[in-house]
Amino acid sequence: MATGVKRDTLRVLLAGHGAFGAVHAQAWAALGFAERLVIADPDPHARAQAQAALPQARVVSDWRMALPDVDVVDLVTPSNTHAAVAMAALDAGCDLLIEKPMTMNRAEAATVAARARQAERIVQVGYVLRAHPAARRLRDIVRAGDIGVPVWIDSAFLSLKRPRRDAGVVLNDAVHVIDLVLWTVGRTPDAVSAVLVEHLGRGVEDIASITLHWQDGPTARVDASCIVAGEHPDPYVAGGISRKHLSVTGDAGQAVADFMTGSVRWRPCRQQRSAGGGHEPVFGLEQVDTFTAPVPRDAVAAELESFVEAVLARRSPEADAGSGLAMAAVCDAVFAAARERRTVEVRA
């Protein structure tokens, strides 16, 4: 980024204008960047849609054409291209927002993170569920100790929807809730076990059942699928019916966030030793917070706003390259655990 760049002069390259790239484009426009936005996509149809939606923006076929003219890159290309585009953007002196996953594996993530440190560039990974108010409320409840020490976490990102072609449900779907689990617990798990199932014959997994293990912390289960319907229409995927939730059980209570309904429910509950030497469950009064879930454009705009603030302040964002590297290490361990049918240590 050029020295002295301010918000009203910051120039943005959006690499990729597929379904979610189009949401990013509208989010940049909502933040006032339409006239300083370059949109790149190799597909003529995508370019035509981009130009029609945002006539103020410059639209090109190749992201490389715009790198010399921008300060930041918003990377929403297929996951298997992230590492190459990210390295080129960093080498061009750009700060970078990368839609999850940061890369396809830990080796690529380590290379990107190292280059970002060397070049003193800001890198933020796009985990849009962090912008959901229910996610932040749940994390606040857990961090405040309102349910005691976490012992069990249950999460799901299940949908019957059009599957993506660039990767399976681990890198496309499970990463959303794995990130929330790591963000809530505050550290990377020590080991993972996993079962991955290919059902559609695409060469990648369509079902993932993952268990995260902490030696001195909770155990967490993460389920993800693109062939298992939930209960609610998904605003992020046209025609998708989804279930997305995160439940944390502590030794003194339980809190559950439902990202489809926008609610967080929590209450004291625990096992109490009885006079006869056994245990009896004890329940307190349930409390409920409800939120208006942000529409996709607004959720992405919140994500982009935090990125812009980090860029202008030259400070590390909350979801930085280190969090992307930790996620890549967990996903590498997931694939190894499923392949080798054993529990695998996470190489942090």
Image: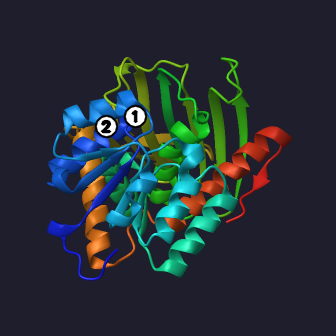
Work out whether 83 lies above or below 206.
Answer: below
Quarter the N terminus occupies? bottom left
Model colouring: rainbow
Q: Secondary structure at mark 1?
A: loop
Task: Measure the alpha-carbon separation of dots 1 and 2.
Answer: 6 Å
Q: Is residue 213 visible?
A: no
Question: 270 or 101, which is in the foreground?
Answer: 101
The answer to which quarter of the image holds residue 283 is: top left
In depth, the one of 268 and 175 nearer the eye is 175
Left-right relation of 229 to 134: right
Does residue 117 appear left or right of residue 71 in this picture? right
Residue ID for mark 2: 22
Q: Residue at x 35, y 48 (%)?
A: 135
Instruction: Residue 45 in the image: state x and y as whole percent.
Output: 36, 27
Tags 1 and 2 touching, CB below 8 Å: yes
Q: Amino acid at mark 1?
A: Gly
Q: Residues within 10 Å of mark 1 (few under 14, many from 20)?
A: some
Q: Which residue is mark 1?
A: 18
For label 2, the SS is helix
Quarter of the image for residue 83 reads bottom right
Position above or below: 99 against 320:
above
Residue sitting at x 71%, y 27%: 203
- Residue 316 spot, x, y in % from top left: 39, 74
For the C terminus, give its image quadrant: bottom right
Q: Amino acid at mark 2?
A: Ala
Residue 308, horizontal then vertical, whole percent = 27, 65
**Is residue 229 visible to us here?**
yes
